Image (tube, rainbow, N blue to C red):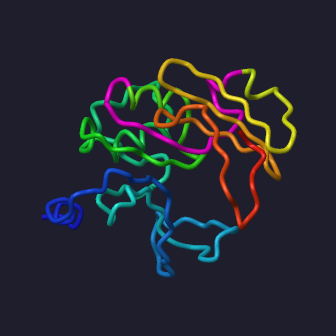
Amino acid sequence: MSFERKVQNLCIPNKNTAIDKSLTLWKGRLSKRQYLPLKALKFGIKTFELCESMWCFLVYTGKSTVLQSSLITPDTPKTAAIVLELLEPLFGRGHTLWLDNFFNSPELARKLNIEHSTDSVGTLKLNTKDVPKEAKDKKLEKQEITARHSGSVTVLKWRDKRNVTMASTYHSADAQRVSNKGKQSPCA
């Protein structure tokens, strides 16, 4: 039995889980070793992981990385395919997936929510396909928020020190006052 199957038999994932990239240090010879000059560990084995006790993971082997999920079609973006591959065993169980902007897109959020009963939340790159034009183009002042909805997906953009954009099927566009280090936010 593989390591991954043993972990899946022993652990029950939390309702809030995340998918992220990881680099495991490797100094020996290996054809699939990655070089990432901006990381502290520059050489290693790159993996994509469902970050709940390494409940599920995928070793990146370049363009030859094998994705076996039946949910993946030829037109599925590679990052969305990785998410579908890793999360497939948890579909329909009421999980909320937290993503960074490498993986997240409004299209993926919609697919996870509608087809697989899984909520998703995460930061979003503004140049990602299907980001509403209003969110891309609107210039915001500090503490200003804009939100756009498309079915179950909410795309929020706000400005603190810089613009932050996120897509969520878990949150609405409601804003509340919160205290940050004793300061009150003017957000209402």
**Going by the image, does 104 lie left or right of 159?**
left
Tell which of 153 and 129 is nearer to you.
Answer: 153
Please give the name of the residue rendered at 40% of the width and 57% of the height, measured from the top-left corner. 49
The image position of residue 20, as x and y in percent, is 48, 56
Q: Quadrant of residue 95?
A: top left
User: Picture quarter containing residue 41?
Assistant: bottom right
Q: Is residue 83 left or right of residue 21?
A: left
- The residue at 44%/52% (across/down) is 19
116 drawn magenta: yes
Relative to the observer, which residue lies in front, 130 or 29? 130
Which image quarter holds the N terminus? Answer: bottom left
**Image quarter of residue 176:** top right
* Rendered view: 46 above or below 132: below
Give the residues in magenta: 114-132
Q: Position of residue 58 (x, y in %)?
A: 37, 55
Q: Residue furthest top?
A: 151
- Residue ranking furthest to the bottom: 27
Q: Is residue 49 above or below residue 39?
A: above
* Residue 116, percent from left and from top: 31, 30
Does the magenta-highlighted stretch encompass residue 185? Answer: no
In screen coordinates, is 31 left or right of 42?
Answer: left
Residue 158 is situated, as x and y percent measured from the top left of the image, at: 74, 40
Quadrant of the snapshot with the C terminus: top right
Residue at the (75%, 51%) spot, across then down: 185
- Residue occupying the point 37% across, 39% down: 84
Total labels drawn: 0
